[in-house]
Image (cartoon, rainbow, N blue to C red):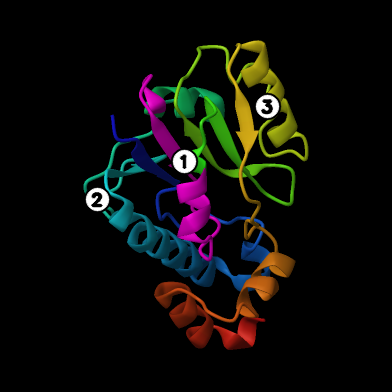
């Protein structure tokens, strides 16, 4: 079975997205940045086939889309995986090379994780799942990746790490992103329109 490609993205609602950047950027610029990231991720992932967009709140902005299940991130991901081969990707890394996703999809392990520098992960590719595979994981922490690996191994799943990348969550990350040699289209347009904020 061809793995599904699932993009987890918060619905584009002012005050609901990229909240750590909002004090520096303002509400509307932060919302526009989030929308740019999601659009760039959609365009990047579409060629892989089988793309599903899963917002956290019902929205008609990205169609077709499937609403995330209630619960914490682990419960949401288990519901989205639904026991099938799939790769779930976050929307906070607009310059993520598609080859990194392909590496996760090609992993022979049950679970392949794309590590982030902050201790989390930008994607998880699953050949097999287990109901307990996220038990005890503290989300959005410096230990999220390590705890996810430990929980998967306790569930008798094999685990592998893929290539690392970085999320854009803080103003320092945004400045790093600005200095990337090649930005995707929507993110580049956002920087062109919001240079004075940085």
User: Label 1: how many residues lie within 10 Å, few (<14), some (14-19) or many (20+)?
Assistant: few
Structural distance between the alpha carbons of marks 1 and 3: 18 Å
Q: Position of residue 139 (x, y in %)?
A: 66, 33
Q: Position of residue 154 (x, y in %)?
A: 67, 12
Mark toward the start of the polypeptide (2 vs 1): 2
Mark toward the start of the polypeptide (2 vs 3): 2
**Residue 5: within the magenta?**
no
Q: Position of residue 145 (x, y in %)?
A: 69, 35
Q: Quadrant of the N terminus?
A: top left
Quickly name the residue at label 1.
106
Q: Residue at x 42, y 54 (%)?
A: 13
Q: Which residues are magenta?
A: 81-103
Mark toward the start of the polypeptide (1 vs 3): 1
Q: Residue at x 32, y 51 (%)?
A: 48
Quickly name the residue at label 3.
149
Quickly name the residue at label 2.
60
């Amino acid at each position: 079975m061809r793995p599904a490609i699932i993009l987890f993205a918060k619905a584009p609602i002012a005050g609901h997205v990229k909240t750590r950047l909002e004090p520096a950027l303002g509400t509307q610029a932060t919302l526009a940045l989030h929308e740019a990231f999601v659009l760039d991720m959609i365009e990047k992932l579409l060629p892989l086939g089988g793309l599903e967009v899963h917002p956290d709140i019902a929205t008609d902005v990205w169609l077709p889309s499937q609403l995330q299940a209630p619960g914490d991130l682990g419960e949401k991901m288990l519901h989205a995986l639904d026991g099938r081969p799939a790769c779930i990707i976050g929307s906070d890394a607009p310059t993520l090379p598609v080859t990194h996703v392909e590496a996760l999809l090609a992993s022979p392990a049950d679970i392949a994780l794309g590590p982030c520098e902050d201790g989390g992960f930008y994607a998880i590719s699953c050949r097999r799942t287990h109901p307990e595979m996220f038990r005890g994981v503290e989300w959005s922490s410096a230990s999220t990746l390590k705890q996810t690996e430990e929980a998967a191994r306790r569930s008798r799943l094999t685990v592998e790490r893929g290539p690392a990348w970085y999320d854009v969550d803080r103003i320092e990350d945004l400045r790093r992103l600005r200095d990337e040699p090649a930005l995707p289209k929507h993110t580049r347009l956002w920087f062109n329109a919001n240079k004075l904020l940085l």
